[in-house]
Every structure is written in C-alpha cells, then in structure tokens.
Amino acid sequence: MTTFSPPLRVTVADSSQLLCSSHFQQLTWTVEDCDFISSAKVLPLSSYELIVGMDWLATYSPMQIDWQHKWLLISHGQEQRL
C-alpha cells in the first residue's frame, strides 16, 4: 500500500469529493469465484466495500447489465460470468 501526502481529492458519482490517503497498486479481489487484480484507492465509504471505476468497466466491455435484477455478465478469461 502506498500513502499520499498530502491526500488526494477524489470525485465520486454524486460529484462530492472524498479524501484519499492511500492506494493499492495491485489489489486482488474476488466476486462470484472470479479473481481480479486492480489498482485501488482507499476511500472512507460507509455503504460499500468496493466501487469499480470506468477504467475497470472499460476493461471488461462489452458487457450485459440488467439494472432491475441487479446483475452484469462479463467475459472473464475463457468464460462469461454473471
């Protein structure tokens, strides 16, 4: 983990800004048995454990998303995962 001094200001989806004082260059994280490695900024979030950014979404595009049923289908290696 790397620390920022002074902390960075990060703009989130609702246009508010949060202070970020640390960063992971290669964070390994898992969802539904799929492992990912991403850079990640550590933010003071109260409701979420992880928020993927536009860079992550672009990496796995195109994808199928059903907002009403809250799922997305991405290609991960040789598989498509829900």
Image: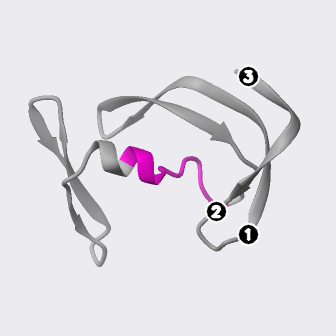
Residue contact between numbered discs 3 and 1, judged by CB atoms under 8 Å: no
Q: Amino acid at mark 1?
A: Ser
Residue under circle 2? 12
Alpha carbons under labels 2 and 3: distance apart: 21 Å
Q: Residue at x 73, y 22 (%)?
A: 2
13 left or right of 74? right
Residue contact between numbered discs 2 and 1, judged by CB atoms under 8 Å: yes
Circle on res. 76:
none
20 left or right of 35? right
Q: Callout 3: helix, strand or loop?
A: strand
57 left or right of 43? left
Residue 21 position, x and y percent, is 81, 37
Residue under circle 3? 2
Q: Residues within 10 Å of mark 1 (few under 14, many from 20)?
A: few
Residue 73 position, x and y percent, is 19, 54
Residue under circle 1? 16
67 left or right of 81? right
Q: Residues in magenta?
A: 47-56
* Quarter holding residue 33: top left
Q: Callout 2: helix, strand or loop?
A: loop
Look at the image and tell me in which quarter the N terminus lies: top right
Q: Amino acid at mark 2?
A: Val
Alpha carbons under labels 3 and 1: distance apart: 23 Å
Q: Earlier in the sequence, mark 3 or mark 1?
A: 3
Alpha carbons under labels 2 and 1: distance apart: 6 Å
Prevalent SS, magenta region: loop
